[in-house]
């Protein structure tokens, strides 16, 4: 029979403590679904939104036959740099295709999009984050709420288009009410729309690597 020294017992207790802590942390973090499929039958073409510079209201029917991604953007988020680089990579990769990227500024999460005007947001991206003269290759629409009583109809539609939620947990720092299971969970969640105007996939906000979207976009463009 093996005998344990005091040192061994201390080591075993530490291991058990680490395992217990890992279990508790795992439970508190909930589950993340980086990519979820959408199965709704209604298209987005009946909706419209105003461009951020106020120059026009766009009927999404104008995008018929195109593949596009919709982001809720924020200038002061920790994921801003990486996600803007993702956007420009995808825009460049599919520049010769019927593909576009749409951004809706949103202040629902941590109030990380305090700016409202086109000039404020574009100049913030150009000179602050990512900075260095960065120009985002996307179409900016009006600043909106994506959750809560004042959410934009496009987001009500997107969340009800059989696109399941991407995270079982809600973060702190939410500036809207009420909270609903279908809610966008944070800045930079994404919806990919197919050529027929129907949502194809929804992506968790942490999917900042272009690889999460690149193959799906290529597939839809090939259809």
Image: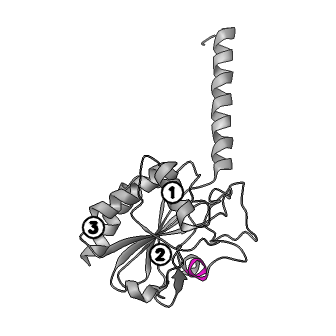
Question: At x 59% / y 52%, what residue is drawn?
Answer: 76
Residue 153 locus on image (x, y percent): 60, 82
Residue named by callout 1: 123
Q: Nearer the viewer, mark 3 or mark 2?
A: 3
Residue 198 locus on image (x, y percent): 43, 82
Is 179 rendered above or below residue 112? below
Residues 190 and 152: in front is 152
Q: Quadrant of residue 196?
A: bottom left
Question: At x 68% / y 22%, what residue is drawn?
Answer: 13
Residues 132 and 13: in front is 132
As drawn, the residue found furthest toward the bottom would be 46
Q: Quadrant of residue 4?
A: top right
Question: At x 66% / y 10%, what residue is drawn?
Answer: 7
Packing grade of label 3 (10 A; few <14, some 14-19, many >=20) is: few
**Prevalent SS, magenta region:** helix
Q: Quadrant of residue 168?
A: bottom right
Q: Secondary structure at mark 2?
A: loop
Residue named by callout 2: 38
User: In which quadrant will I find the C terminus?
Assistant: bottom left
User: Is tag 1's residue or tag 2's residue first in the polypeptide sequence?
Assistant: 2
Q: CA distance from mark 3 to mark 2?
A: 25 Å
Is 219 rendered above or below residue 81? below
User: Can you see residue 206?
Assistant: no
Q: Secondary structure at mark 1?
A: helix
Q: CA distance from mark 1 to mark 2?
A: 35 Å
The span picked out in magenta is: 153-157
Question: At x 62% / y 79%, what residue is drawn?
Answer: 152
Residue named by callout 3: 95
């Amino acid at each position: 029979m093996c005998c344990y020294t005091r040192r061994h017992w201390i080591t075993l207790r530490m291991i058990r403590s680490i395992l217990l802590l890992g279990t508790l942390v795992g439970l508190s973090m909930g589950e993340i679904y980086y990519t979820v499929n959408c199965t709704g039958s209604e298209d987005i073409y009946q909706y419209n939104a105003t461009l951020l510079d106020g120059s026009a209201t766009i009927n999404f029917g104008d995008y018929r036959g195109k593949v596009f991604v919709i982001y809720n953007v924020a200038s002061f988020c920790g994921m801003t740099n990486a996600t803007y680089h993702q956007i420009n990579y995808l825009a460049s990769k599919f520049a010769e295709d019927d593909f576009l990227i749409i951004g809706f500024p949103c202040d629902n999460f941590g109030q990380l999009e305090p700016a409202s005007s086109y000039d404020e947001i574009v100049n913030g991206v150009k000179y602050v984050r990512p900075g260095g003269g960065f120009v985002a290759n996307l179409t900016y629409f009006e600043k909106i709420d994506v959750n809560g009583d004042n959410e934009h109809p496009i987001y009500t539609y997107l969340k009800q288009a059989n696109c399941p939620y991407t995270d079982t947990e809600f973060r702190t720092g939410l500036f809207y009410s009420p909270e609903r299971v279908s809610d966008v969970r944070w800045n930079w969640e994404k919806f990919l729309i197919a050529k027929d105007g129907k949502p194809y996939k929804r992506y968790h906000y942490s999917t900042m690597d272009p690889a999460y979207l690149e193959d799906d976009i290529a597939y839809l463009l090939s259809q």
